[in-house]
Image (cartoon, rainbow, N blue to C red):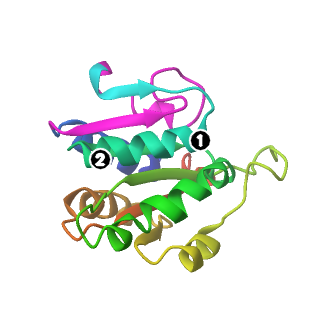
Amino acid sequence: MGKYKEELVKAMNWLGSKSDIVFIGQAVVDKGTAISDTLLNIPPEKKIELPVTEALQMGLSIGMTLNGSKVVSIYPRFDFLILATNELVNHLNRLKKYSNNEYEPSVIIRTSIGSVKPLHPNFQHCNNYSDAFRLMCDNIDVIELIEAESIFPAYENAYNRTDGRSTILVEFADFLNET
């Protein structure tokens, strides 16, 4: 296992040890993506498998966070997170502002830029929208996880936030098997 994947597993195991954490998304319980392999040690009661309903998933993530859970909302491909853009930009990003700081949801959004090697999956699975989401979201940090050493601290910081901001953590699937 490469260092990048080891750091992702370490971060997920650490998050999974927290009493208030919940992981939701596609291929969270059921296998199906490279992200699935990083969640193998997470207790089943901390994982909620969802169908492909990206907008609903973001709405659930916001609601669960407002109800006291710390949510890791997993979108296996950054391209699929686009389908939740309304909820992400107009609700999660702005809720603190339009509630006069009464509600401060802090969701951890985990996504990945699909691998293009050894086989290119086609252009709807491997795009990086980090800059676009930075432009649209003034209350959400977008962190690109380029170096393996940055993975654990980034997830730790996202979990420990007390500023009412959410975090999008962007992984790079091509780095998973590198040593």
Q: Main secondary structure of the magenta part?
A: loop
Rendered image: mark on residue 54: 1
Instruction: Say if 44 sits above or below 83 in the image.
Output: above
Q: x and y percent of residue 45 in the render? A: 28, 21
Instruction: Say if 118 sits above or below 156 in the image.
Output: above
Task: Give the magenta-colored segment's residue range.
Answer: 19-44
> Which three-letter amino acid code belongs to the residue tagged 1?
Glu
Q: Magenta span has 25?
A: yes
Residue that sits furthest to the left in the current view: 19
Q: Earlier in the sequence, mark 2 or mark 1?
A: 1
User: Residue, x 31% and y 67% (percent of image)?
Assistant: 99
User: Residue, x 45% and y 66% (percent of image)?
Assistant: 147
Q: Count of labels shown?
A: 2
Q: Magenta span has 49?
A: no
Judging depth in this view, the residue of 167 and 93 nearest the camera is: 93
Judging depth in this view, the residue of 170 and 161 nearest the camera is: 161
User: Residue, x 54% and y 22% (percent of image)?
Assistant: 31
Query: Element type at marker 2?
Result: helix
Q: Is residue 126 visible?
A: yes
Residue neighbourhood size for the residue with mark 1, other residues' Cα within 10 Å, grouped as few (<14), some (14–19), many (≥20)? many
Q: x and y percent of residue 57 in the render? A: 50, 39
Q: x and y percent of residue 87 in the render? A: 53, 54
Q: Is residue 10 visible?
A: no
> Which three-letter amino acid code belongs to the residue tagged 2?
Thr
Which residue is denoted by mark 2 in the rendering? 65
